[in-house]
Amino acid sequence: MAPQHNRNAEPPAGNQALIDRVDLLLGAGFIGDEKAARIVESVPETPGAIVDWLQQFAAAEDWRRFRRFALLAGSIKPPGLAPVIREALDRTPTPAEVNREDLVEILGEIRDAAAVPTLLRFFEETWPKEAPFHSASVKSIQALGTIGTPEAQQALRGIATNDRYANPLRWYAAIELEIEDELGFDEDEMLNGQ
């Protein structure tokens, strides 16, 4: 069941002040672990509140803030983050302000085992449109490799052994499973074929 979105959803006043402060601290540019640590030091409420903030941004369809705070949350890795990220990645259509590749990376980094079906859907949707360069598809393969559950490994094996996928994608999946030699992939051929 799709969540109800309320464009007028406003966080409580105290939360809004914290959100605005974090937004200001995010500034421009790369949002990585160092910046996240500085923000958490400056606004210690962030790890406990950021998942709620992401849900509020999604409900209000404030995708610009959602994107920025999702990147921050990806570095903080708070409990409860995975379902919010999966839901955003599964949205159809995905808002233009949300970089789906970033969401894929976050799901891999937090090793969300429940994300395997979501990552497979993303892979199936993106790979045919990306030829000859499969950046988003490769990110989903890498996320599956990082997750590493039996279900993720089965999905990777399905990609690696299926001729309908582009050879470079099959090779990347085989690398994640460490079976590229077993399947007879030649690294030079795969890299030159991309």
Image (cartoon, rainbow, N blue to C red):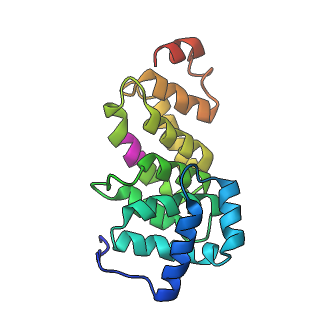
- Please say if 25 is above or below 120: below
Q: Residue at x 43, y 73 (%)?
A: 55
Is any atom of residue 148 visible in this view?
no
Q: Residue 190: horizontal and vertical position, in percent?
A: 52, 17
**Residue 129 rendering spot, x and y as whole percentages:** 31, 33
Examine the rendering and report whether any part of residue 61 can be seen.
Answer: yes
Q: Quadrant of residue 181?
A: top right
| Residue 14 within the magenta-colored segment of the rendering | no
Q: Residue at x 39, y 54 (%)?
A: 98
Q: Residue at x 51, y 40 (%)?
A: 139
Q: Nearer the viewer, residue 80 or 182?
A: 80
Q: Splitting the image into 4 quarters, where does residue 35 fall?
A: bottom right
Whole-percent x, y for residue 31 in the image: 59, 53
Farthest residue toward the bottom? 13
Residue 77 location (% of width, % of height): 62, 63
The number of discs equals 0
Image quarter of residue 22: bottom right
In this view, 3 is above or below 185: below
Range shown magenta: 120-124
Residue 37, above or below 139: below
Q: Nearer the viewer, residue 155 or 41?
A: 41
- Viewer-nearest residue: 5 or 19: 19
Residue for point 50% across, 13% down: 192
- In this rendering, the answer to whether 80 lies above or below 147 is below
Quarter the N terminus occupies = bottom left
139 vs 41, left or right, is: left
Task: Tell me which secondary structure the magenta stretch mostly adopts.
Answer: helix
